[in-house]
Amino acid sequence: MAKRRKEMDEEEDIDFHLPKFDEEKFVRKEKEKIKVTFIAFIFGIFVSIISFGFWALLHGNNLRWILILLFALFTISWLKYLFIRLNINLEDIDKKGMLGVYSTYFFTWLILLVVLVNPPFYDDTPPLVEVVTLPSMQEPGGTVEIVARITDNAGIQNISLVINGNGTTMKIPPSQYIFNNSIFQYTFYGPTSINGEIEYNYSLIAKDINGHIVVKNGSFWYSNDALKITSSKLTDLLSGDTISIKADSRIAPWNFRVYYQLDNGSEINVNRNTPDDKERYITTPEYEGWEPLKNYTLTLHAEVRYYFENLPIEFSNIVTDTTIYHVSTGDDNDIGKEPPLVEYNYTRASIGKKQLPNTLNYKLPHPTRVMVPGFDIVLLVSAIVITGFIFKYRKKDRHYR
C-alpha cells in the first residue's frame, strides 16, 4: 500500500509544469497601465482648469464647492470613453488598476484646483472681520475698546475707523490704533461728564490687496446709569441685609462680571438676583472682605471679557460706577464669614467635577475652540474610501492565490 502511494506521488510530481511566462503580454500590459495613468493625469489637469472657470462663474453661490465636486465626479465617466477613442485595450487593466487610474485623475484635479482658486492665482473673498466693543455701554470717564479680528487669504492693504457721536465725526489715523497678528485694537476716550446718555456709532472698513472691502458697523453708549446701587439702606448693615445693584444689559451682549471693592481692597463678586436676569444683582455683608462695626467707601465695577474663537487671548475692559458709595456695618458676628464667590470653572466641568458651592450663578466667557469642516473633509473621505477599496482587492487577490 505504501509502495502504491509512493508511485502515485511520483506521478503527480512528474505531471506538474511551471506556467510559461509571457514576457510580451506582460510588457504590453505595463505599457497600457502607464499610458492610461498618464492620460488620467493630463485629463485631471484639463478638468481642473475647466472647474476653475466654473469657480469664477459661480462667485457668490454657496453651493459652489459641491457643484464643482459633482462635475469632477461626473467627468470620471469620460475617461473610459477617452481610453476607447485612443484604442487602449482596457481588458489588460484589472479593477485595482482602474481604481488607481481614477485616483490619479481625482487627486490631480483636486490639488491643482485648490492651488488655482487661492492667491496668488485667484482671490474673490473679502476680508473676514469680527468686531466687538468692550464695553458697549460705559460710564463717563471710562474707555471703550474697539477690538476686531481681521483676516484675509491674500493680505490686508488698508484699515480705517470712523466714529460719529456727540456732534462730532472722527476719522482715526493709523497711528492711533494697533493692528498686529490679525488683531485690530483702538481705545476710545469718552467724555468725563454727561447729562443722560450719549450714543456713538462707528464704521470699521477693511480692504485687502485685491480691492475687496468689508464694512462693519457698531454702536456704544455713555451713561451715568450703566451701573448703580438701588438699595436705600447702606448704613448699619447686618449679614442678612441685601444690597441691590442694577447693571444695564447693554454693557455687553454676553455675560459680564459685576463686583465691588471696599476701600479699594479685594474684588468681591456679585451674584445675580435670578441667573437669567443680566440687570439685577445682589450681595450682602456676609462675604469675606466685610467686617462688623466699620465704615467703607464702596466702588462698583463690571468687567467685560471676550475671546475670539480658536484664540485663547482675553480682551477685556472695566466699567466703573462714577458714584462713590459710603456704607457701614453694624454689630453682627456673621459679617465677613462666607467665602467669596468664584467664577464658573470650565476645567472642573470638562473633567466631570462638581462646581464649588460658592460659584457664581452665571457663566462668564471663556476660550473656545471650534473645528469647522471645509473642503479638506472631502479629501479625507475620498482617501478613506480609496484605501478601503485597495485593501478589499488585496484581500481578494490573497484569497484567489
Image: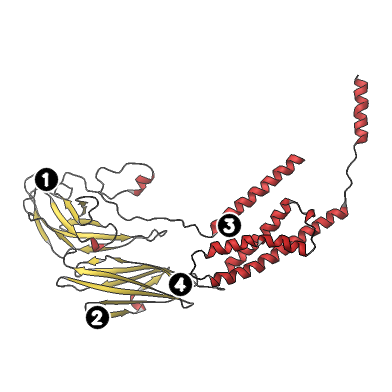
Return the residue at label 1: 240
Q: Locate residue 322: give its quadrant.
A: bottom left
Question: Which of the two discs, 4 and 1, sits closer to the camera?
Answer: 4
Question: Which circle's residue, 4 or 2, is located before the other in the chain?
Answer: 4
**Residue 328 location, x and y as percent?**
8, 53
| Amino acid identity at mark 4 | Pro
Who's the residue at 63% across and 48% down the image?
388
Mark 4, residue position: 126
Q: Which residue is mark 2?
A: 168
Residue 379 image label? 3
Quarter of the figure that contains the N terminus: top right
Of the numbered discs in the image, which one, if any, rests on residue 369?
Answer: none
Determine whether, in the image, residue 174 is placed left or right of residue 375.
Answer: left
Lower position in the chain sequence, tag 2 or tag 1: 2
Q: Amino acid at mark 2?
A: Thr
Find the distance from the CA under tag 4 to the CA under tag 2.
Answer: 30 Å
Residue 38 in sight from this viewpoint? no
Cα separation, mark 4 vs mark 1, equals 57 Å
Horizontal and vertical percent position of residue 266: 21, 54
Which element is circle 1 on? Answer: loop
Front in this rendered view, residue 369 or 59: 59
- The quarter of the displayed image where residue 355 is located: top left
Q: Could you give the CA–CA distance between mark 3 and mark 1, rounded to whole angstroms?
A: 64 Å
Q: Is residue 250 left or right of residue 109?
A: left
Q: CA distance from mark 2 to mark 3?
A: 53 Å
Front-most of residues 256 and 74: 74
In three-dimensional space, the C-alpha distance between marks 2 and 1, rounded to whole angstroms, equals: 49 Å
Where residue 133 sits in the image (x, y, percent)? 30, 67
Which is in the foreground here, disc 2 or disc 1? 2
